Image (cartoon, rainbow, N blue to C red):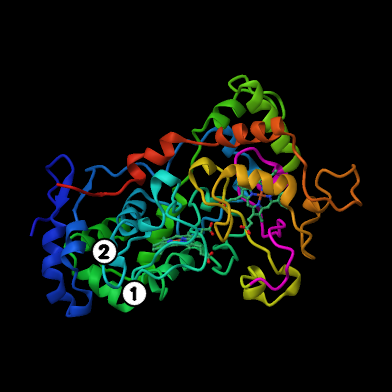
Amino acid sequence: MNRYSPGRAGWTVACLATALAAPLAWGQPASAPSPKEVAKLRSLKLPDTPYNYANVELPAHFKSRAVRDLDNTPRENPITDNGATLGRVLFYDIRLSANNAVACASCHHQKHAFSDPSGKLSKGYEGKHTDRNAMPLVESRYYGRGRFFWDERARTLEEQVLMPVQSKVEMGQDLTKLVEKLAAASEYPELYRKAFGDSKVTRERTSRALAQFVRSLVSYQSKYDEGVAQVRSRNDDFPNFTREENRGKAIFMRSCANCHMPNNQDAIFSTQNTQNNGLDADVKVPDLGVADVTLDRNRTGHFKSPSLRNVEYTGPYMHDGRFAKLEDVIEHYSTGIKQHPNLDGRLRNAGGPPGGGRQTRGFDFSTGEKAALLAFLKTLSDPKFISDPKFSNPFEAE
Ligand code: HEC
Ligand code: HEC
């Protein structure tokens, strides 16, 4: 078996051979990869010196107190270069699923800011559909409440990352078996040693490494970022924006930022907690969101929103993927808001007279305003983020 060989420019481990030998080692005929799966297993390629995940120089607008307050990194699991490297390998490894059919990356594609473009719902290891639309993974680190999933049912990211592994729909993998499987694979003990000091594979280390990788997925090189760095206030026109983009920015700051840019800061575009944004009027839809978890009827139809960074690439949109295009989302906020009893106050009188009081169907944007808002949302795209090799699939074709 080809092992770690430090002298080479990058190192390669023949995973194909691992996979062929593995059914014996795992003693699990059920998890023997089919020929089709074997074809998907490629060799692992990592740089000799790990990529920089721990000390990324973020622009000034990420360094404010308000942004630091949103950071959910726990003291006991800071990002290290070797920890995030291990997390990256795990994230792309189909062996995390019971039948070696899907990896995290099967539903979280880098090109789509780690969301799934394949449809409203994603397919798990046995082809069954998930209950909800796969969330993009951008700025997960800066969700201040540190809770995950659309309904916040995971209390920490460390807890969250092991949930898809065990889910009967997503990966169907027993954690005890996973630990055995990884410990028996040729490349992992060395990666665990580098990340955690010795080669022992444990659940906790697996969770910590995956969480480190997910927290490292920060996008900060969009046209918006270049613009905000050149002005005193985000409300000033950005010199690098077109007139239309600046117009869209003004609309966004007026109508959307109070939810999608929490804590009065200029860098983070995820909501600060859960809200009802008027998707349904009916209180009896099958997916009650937060209320299914907390049984609190005041939070029926409450969901968190993922970051809007790279939103151009992350369709379909909303927890059920009901909107295929960004134009549909904008139309929702313009004329489609439903008067659910828990509808957020900021949307109840959207477009109504100052001071509120009148229920409306939305912001009633003009055609020009809709086009401007769309143009602004596209300034949040970060082509470097969706092609950065340090976030890419380390299992490459020979
Ligand atoms: C079969 C598809 C699928 C696979 C495989 C999968 N996910 Fe997901 N992921 C989803 C869906 C769907 C959601 C939203 C589920 C919900 O809210 O109920 C989600 C949500 C998440 C979130 C929450 C993001 C947030 O902002 O709250 C994180 C983090 C995440 N996944 C990471 C992972 C990791 C790490 C793995 C691998 C261990 C993984 N996912 C495997 C489909 C998948
Ligand atoms: C009251 C807070 C609030 C306001 C104001 C608001 N949103 Fe949202 N937004 C949300 C919530 C909550 C979700 C997630 C809802 C769901 O999926 O059930 C969301 C989801 C989205 C999504 C989909 C994200 C994804 O990854 O699927 C987009 C895009 C979006 N909003 C854009 C906007 C725009 C543009 C505006 C202004 C016109 C706006 N929002 C105003 C709370 C808000």
Which of the image's four quarters has the N terminus? bottom left
**SS type, badge 2:** loop
The residue beneath circle 2 is 198
- What separation in Å lies between label 2 and label 1 (alpha carbons)? 24 Å
Residue 258 forms part of the magenta stretch:
yes
The answer to whether residue 77 is left or right of residue 95 is right
Residue numbers of the magenta segment: 256-285
Which of the 4 quarters of the picture holds residue 13? bottom left
Q: Which SS type dominates the magenta stretch?
A: loop
209 vs 332, left or right, is left
The image quarter in which residue 118 lies:
bottom left
Is label 2 in contact with label 1 (beta carbons under 8 Å)? no
x and y percentages locating residue 84 in the rendered image: 36, 52
Per the image, label 1 sits on a secondary structure element best described as: loop
**Residue beneath disc 1:** 173
Residue 177 is situated, as x and y percent measured from the top left of the image, at 28, 77
| Residue 266 painted magenta | yes
Q: Residue at x 41, y 35 (%)?
A: 384
**Residue 383 location, x and y as percent?**
43, 35
Q: Amino acid at mark 2?
A: Asp
Q: Is mark 2 within 8 Å of ligand 1?
A: no
Location of residue 221 with respect to 114 vertically, above or below: above
Query: Disc 1 residue type?
Result: Gln
Q: Residue at x 56, y 68 (%)?
A: 155
